[in-house]
Image (cartoon, coloured by chain):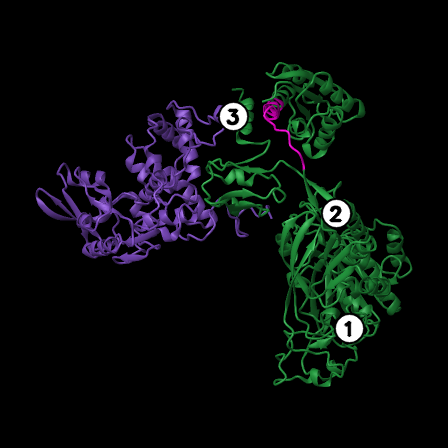
Amino acid sequence: MIDVAAIKAHAKALLEKGTVRAVIGYRNSTAGLLAEPFVFTGPESVDDLIYGPSCVQNLALYLVNDKKERAHHKSDDARPVAVVAKGCDARAITVLLQEKHFLREAIHVIGVSCEGTGVVDTKKLARKLGGKHAVEIDFDGGEAFAVTTADGVQSLPAAEIMAERCLECRGAHPQLADIAFGEAKTDRALHTPFQAVKHKMKEEQDNRWSFWARQFDRCLRCYACRSVCPMCYCEECVVDSIQFAVLPDTTAEEKANRIKWIERSPNRSESAMYHMVRAIHLAGRCIDCAECERVCPVNIPLRLLNTRLEMEAFETFDYNPGSDMNAPTLTSSFKDTDPNSFIR
Amino acid sequence: MTKRTGVFVCHCGNNIAATVDVARVAKEMGEVEGVIFSKDYVYMCSDPGQSTMANAIKDNKLDSVVVSCCSPTLHEKTFRDVTEEGGELNPYRCEIANIREQCAWVHKEKPKATEKALKITRAAIKRVQNNQSLTPIGVPVTRRVMVIGGGVAGIQAALDLANAGLQVVLVEKNPTVGGHMIQLSETFPTLDCSQCILSPKMVEVSKNKNIKLLTQAEVQEVSGFVGNFKVKVRQKAIYVDPEKCKICDDCAKVCPTVVPNEYDLNLTPRRAIFIPYAQAIPATYTLDESACLGLNPVVCGKCADVCEADAINYDMRPKTIVEEVGAIVVATGFDLYGKENLGEYGMGKYADVLDGLQFERLCSASGPTGGHVLRPSDHKEPKNVVFIQCAGSRDPESHCAYCSKICCMYTAKHATLYKHHVPDGQAYVFYIDIRSGGKGYEEFVQRSMERDEVMYLRGRVSKVYENNGSMIVKGVDTISGKNVEIEADMVVLALAMQPSKGTADVAKTLKIGRDKDGFLAEAHPKLRPVESVTAGIFLAGAAQAPKDIPETVCQASAAASKVIQLLSKDELMHSPAIAKVRLSHCTGCEMCVQACPYGAISLSGPNAKASVNDVLCEGCGTCQAVCLRAAIDVKNITQMQVHDMINACLGV
């Protein structure tokens, strides 16, 4: 079992010695079961640090935010920032490093294992408990979660209440880590990779389109999916004409010639375009943290859309995002073994 | 955004006008916003067409021009020149709307094709209205040339270039120049000795002061661009000083290692220290390190002991040489199709089944049998010899789909030579067709049939097998419709020609394309047959397609003349339609750097953002496609222009 006290001790030592600026981790939230991301800056604050199946958020996002904030405040503190990273978070950090978003030495990765079970899906849990309210959840050996309700603690099979993405996870233990805690269980084989998308692909094309048309009709274009995605770090989103960056060197001509690839109104055509452009921009970069799907207020199954392209990347180009920070990215690289050998 | 656009719609005779209502295109384009002049004409590229265009630009003070005509690869230059010279307008204010190849030629229904032509032209108008005036970038030229491959093609190209006063670096993989031609006995259709006509050229290579010869060397890396290539060449150590070597053969006499001699197609042995043949250029022995006992005086060292000239040095090491050249000629030649693929003909199984090159060696006076045609198995004179044409060629199902072109002729030559050597023997040739186009070729084949009584059998051989100690060739004669069985003393296969083994690597290193059969691809099959798709890299010889000696020499000289033309100027003009970074949007993710096929982008500056090398960039737009942040644009085809073009097509 992962020793949360040891993680805490490590984080505390880092902050006490001042080797890091801050530790990005989780603490108990005041609302609901899920943990909340928190930036620990003082050694004493680390007492609140927790780690367990309720820590679902991808903390790589907070590294991206940290960079933006530092740029905004013109911070000159050159010390690295530490981050608690599950397998998926570490993959996201790897992609960001691959894209030179920050230097390796600017980050101290505290790798944490998911103990072979992954994180919880609160909707599944609520269904499982049938109306009872869970107040706490913890790892319970390799195949179960210990869930505390008003009735006391019960052990529930993890496979039934864990997040969909964890069922298909191919790298539960963080590969990129300065220090790692917990058992390295990676070959869990709960579901075959891309099982959900493969299942969907079996449907007729017309059915699939009407399914997606329905989903896109419901999209509010609140951009929560974009806000939560660590890969959506662009200053200016090419499909969103309302948040064009106006910088000191933006010329009048540039301002006048803004391209509106997509209209602002949330209708089927524009929303479909938005989601598909986002999915294509994530090809070879999405590490399947499924945060976009989790935060969607209207429950659009975005994971299906994004993993469809990840499947393509994996099966056609043998590309696994977040596995090697020194490898060239999917869209920018070419291998002799790539298909379509007529391009020689 | 320009305000005075002119549109010129070409009929291209009937090429466009038959499928597209050109008058309607011209009329409707006249109504597009910003267009003040629109006209159709039967041949825009003709002289009157060009004058119409030049006058219209001046008279109407046009500030941008669209020509709706054929592909820009054909007449973009013509019309940009007219724009500049006749119209006194920046040539980059002229764009082509391709309504021929991309419209008229691929559609049948006139109303639909006309609709499409309208869209294509409207899109081009939108594009050109946002074009910038650009000035070509001048780049200085290195007046040196590299020729890769020292066969007859490479030799000819190197000599032509050197005689034109250019410095040439000739790179050859083997210990000597000469290629396959030096292995041949006689050449069709005149039957002059191959060695006798090639060796003078080889000597000239060694004597010419403008030629730097690098043998046992291979190109490893190429960077730069037309006019300014930097080529890294790796030269193996030969362990013999060519200046000191007296070619006395003392070393080979004492060498204890025996390996097959590649020059004789493994029909004879050679030593680890050897000279491929007497006329080898450079004239020196060379030590084959893979065969040598260890380059170590403690292990053997016999050759070094006997060498009076003290030419042998075990301490030589491979060298990496960097050459700066302005152009490259690729003449990497051919290899025969692998015999292991032709098991049905008994190749590799029976000693007396030979390939064409082996038979050449048997006929050659310098060959393993001193110019007598003898069977390798028992050194007896073969009385019945079967030649099988198209062995591996013209067989799309299991071998090469293409015709290897020279086999008909060299098989006729082989049969003739055989009759000259063995007058009482009988030659049989199995063929599909006889392709003898060429000066004196058809007569040569006829002569082999009539004078030398070569028996031509139209049909394929199904099997070669052994029966009671003799080889049986089983085939069909489709003219008589009968199955034929011939007891043969020797079988010679006219194996297909394929690109030499290193061709794929060379193509990759030089970033030039290959065709579906693996031969190097020319830029245009008819009009640019000796140019590769990469500027400044030219092709010569059988690496481009199967060809005989006269054609190879022609192409080599053609490539040389193209190089001379290229390097005759002090400065080359580079297209200014290149990529430009929007620094405000660049995050330095390096994707464009990795994606750029020309190595033109690097990260620079305080925040490590992309920066484009103007002369390396070819404006291909790959960077534009990979950039997630729209932070890189190619001039005159910016995202804004693409967006406007899409809108124009959609009618938004």
Q: Say if residue B625 shows up in the picture.
A: yes
To which residue does mark 3 refer? A253
Q: Amino acid at mark 1?
A: Arg
* Chain letter of the residue carrying label 1: B
Which percent across, then down, holds residue B317? 63, 71
Q: Are marks 3 and 1 on the same chain?
A: no
* Chain letter of the residue carrying label 2: B
Q: Residue at x 35, y 54 (%)?
A: A176
Residue nearest the observer in this picture, A158 or A111: A111
Label 2 crowding class (10 Å Cα cut-off): few <14, some 14-19, many 20+? many
**Label total for image:** 3
The chain drawn in green is: B
Q: Are marks 2 and 1 in contact (CB under 8 Å)?
A: no
Q: Secondary structure at mark 2?
A: loop
User: Is residue A33 shown above or below A46?
Assistant: above
Q: Quadrant of residue A187?
A: bottom left
Q: Is residue A14 left or right of residue B218?
A: left
To which residue does mark 1 refer? B375
Q: Secondary structure at mark 1?
A: loop
The chain drawn in purple is: A
Residue nearest the observer in this picture, B253 or B62: B62
* Chain letter of the residue carrying label 3: A
Magenta span covers which residues? B119-136
Q: CA distance from mark 2 to mark 1?
A: 41 Å
Q: Amino acid at mark 3?
A: Glu
Q: CA distance from mark 3 to mark 1?
A: 82 Å
